[in-house]
Image (cartoon, rainbow, N blue to C red):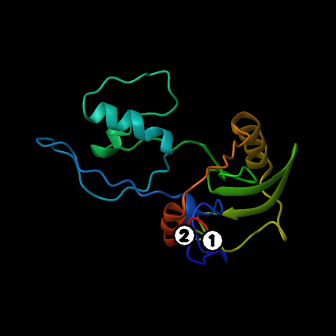
Amino acid sequence: AFLQHGVLGHNTNVYREMVQVPFVFVPPAGTNWEWGTRDEVVELVDLYPTLAEAFGLEYNNGLDGTSLLPVLQGASVDSPETVYTQSRTGDLIAVRHGATKMIFTTGGAEVELIEWYDVELDRAEQQNLLPTTPPPAPALEFARAAIARNYIEPELDTAQFDPEQEDQLRALGYVE
């Protein structure tokens, strides 16, 4: 994050600049795939099955995620209807349902909606609509169901680093 939402650093929020991960892929030699940029919404869980299939490796089809090989080969795929994101510390959750993105805060068992955006009209997520307009009821229902289904209580470790490692992490912006 580079101050788009008043924050500088890594792993600090669930806004687009933090959770949209570019996927750059160079196909295996001898393939005839389309090069270019795609706008489909996909999830990080799709990475493993995609790479496994692209390189002819066997993978467990019982895992979450779908191979995006058809996308890499130029086909369109249906984007997931609902995409769930949770901060590392578990205190922030974002759920995107269609063009609606909602951000929730967690406090124990309580989950509270704090922001919502129309990401088709506001890609940068700068205009929080919650103060003036309630989110669409179906999207809110999907979001609450996604949270109930996907929330994982974080297990924050207390790793110990030597002074040299701490200096390296500080230089990268991971610790203050």
Q: Which residue is mark 1?
A: 176
Residue 1 is left or right of residue 25, and the answer is right
Residue 110 is left or right of residue 15, and the answer is right
Residue type pointed to by label 2:
Arg
47 shown above or below 159: above
The location of residue 100, given as percent across then percent down, is 67, 56
Residue at 74% x, 41% y is 147
Residue type pointed to by label 1:
Glu
Residue occupying the far left of the picture:
30
Residue at 13% x, 43% y is 29
24 shown above or below 31: below
The location of residue 22, given as percent across then percent down, is 41, 58
Residue at 61% x, 69% y is 121
Residue 112 is left or right of residue 158, and the answer is right
Question: Badge 1, how many Cα within 10 Å: few under 14, some, many 20+?
Answer: few
8 shown above or below 23: below
The location of residue 6, given as percent across then percent down, is 67, 78
Disc 2 to disc 1, C-alpha distance: 6 Å
First in sequence: mark 2 vs mark 1: 2
Q: Is the residue under label 1 in contact with that under label 2 (CB below 8 Å)?
A: yes
Q: Quadrant of residue 28?
A: top left
53 shown above or below 42: above
The location of residue 73, given as percent across then percent down, is 27, 43
- Secondary structure beneath disc 1? loop
Question: Badge 2, how many Cα within 10 Å: few under 14, some, many 20+?
Answer: few
Disc number for residue 1: none
Residue at 77% x, 55% y is 104
Q: Which residue is mark 2?
A: 170
**Quarter of the picture holding the C terminus:** bottom right
